[in-house]
Amino acid sequence: MVSAASAMPATVTTLPQGSQTPSASGSSSQLLNQSDFLQLMTAQLENQDPLNPMTGTEFAAELAEFSTAQGVQGLQTSMTSVGGTLSGMQAAGLVGQNVAVAGNTLLLGANGNAVGALNLPSAAADVTVTIGNGGATPVATLNLGAMPAGTQPFVWNGAGSSGSQAASGTYTFTVNAVGASGSSLSATPYAVLPVTAVTLGGQSGPTLDLEGSQAPVALSAVQQIF
């Protein structure tokens, strides 16, 4: 392809006022549009070397190149729109399901069970989860034993350390994990909460309302679906 810049002589034709040209910053508001391209093409034809004029093939090639670039840009815009629609559909399908997000909240429901999760960087020889309600004395302790690496769920049946059933409500938990060598592992706790509603159209994409959580969380914050 012969570019407009390479075929033009030293004389420079000034574009009409208001035309936009590319800048060093690459701002999308200053990219050549179709009108700018046609003005440059006209200037090229007016100032071409009479002894070496542009051929019809070169002219057609430049038009085809610009049309291709416009088509690619349009395709990218369409794919972005489709991606946003699919993301919204995926988020809407999570209503009523449990998702794991960053946090150490345990929601003990009326059925007497609470689900939590934790992530281990490597396999653990022993994992212990301590459950509390903000007081100085733990409500319950779960001995989960050996667990593989990765995100692992666990269930608390609501039984307290004294053997009595804990009341429904929100609790917190901490994780103590020990590796095969006896060294402590840094385990990441995850709150597993049901999705109650989905909000679409935000600047950061869909957000989820979770039971027991005061602030909505982004769909991208979901670590796992249970």
Image (cartoon, rainbow, N blue to C red):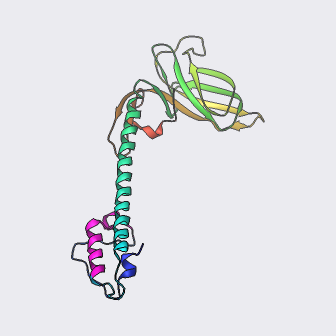
Please indicate, yes or no, whether residue 139 appears anywhere in the rendered image.
Answer: no
Indicate the position of residue 114 as horizontal and vertical percent values.
52, 20
Q: Residue lying furthest left in this view? A: 17
Query: Is residue 145 on the magenta stretch?
Result: no
Q: Residue lying furthest top in this view? A: 164
Q: Is residue 15 left or right of residue 100?
A: left
Q: How many numbered marks appear? A: 0
Q: Residue lying furthest front in this view? A: 56
Please indicate, yes or no, whether residue 57 appears anywhere in the rendered image.
Answer: yes
Indicate the position of residue 12 as horizontal and vertical percent values.
30, 85
Measuring 34% from the left and 54% from the top, which residue is drawn there?
74
Q: Is residue 62 left or right of residue 128?
A: left
Q: Please state the extent of the stretch shown in magenta in the rendering.
A: 25-45
Indicate the position of residue 101 as horizontal and vertical percent values.
49, 34
Query: Is residue 30 on the magenta stretch?
Result: yes
Residue 98, compared with residue 183, is above or below; it is above
- Give 43 or 146, whichever is nearer the viewer: 43
- Give 131 or 150, whichever is nearer the viewer: 150
- Give 48 or 14, whichever is nearer the viewer: 48
The overriding secondary structure of the stretch rendered in magenta is: helix
Q: Is residue 139 left or right of residue 80?
A: right
Residue 190, located in which quarter of the rendered image?
Answer: top right
Indicate the position of residue 26 as horizontal and vertical percent values.
39, 67
Residue 1, located in which quarter of the rendered image?
Answer: bottom left
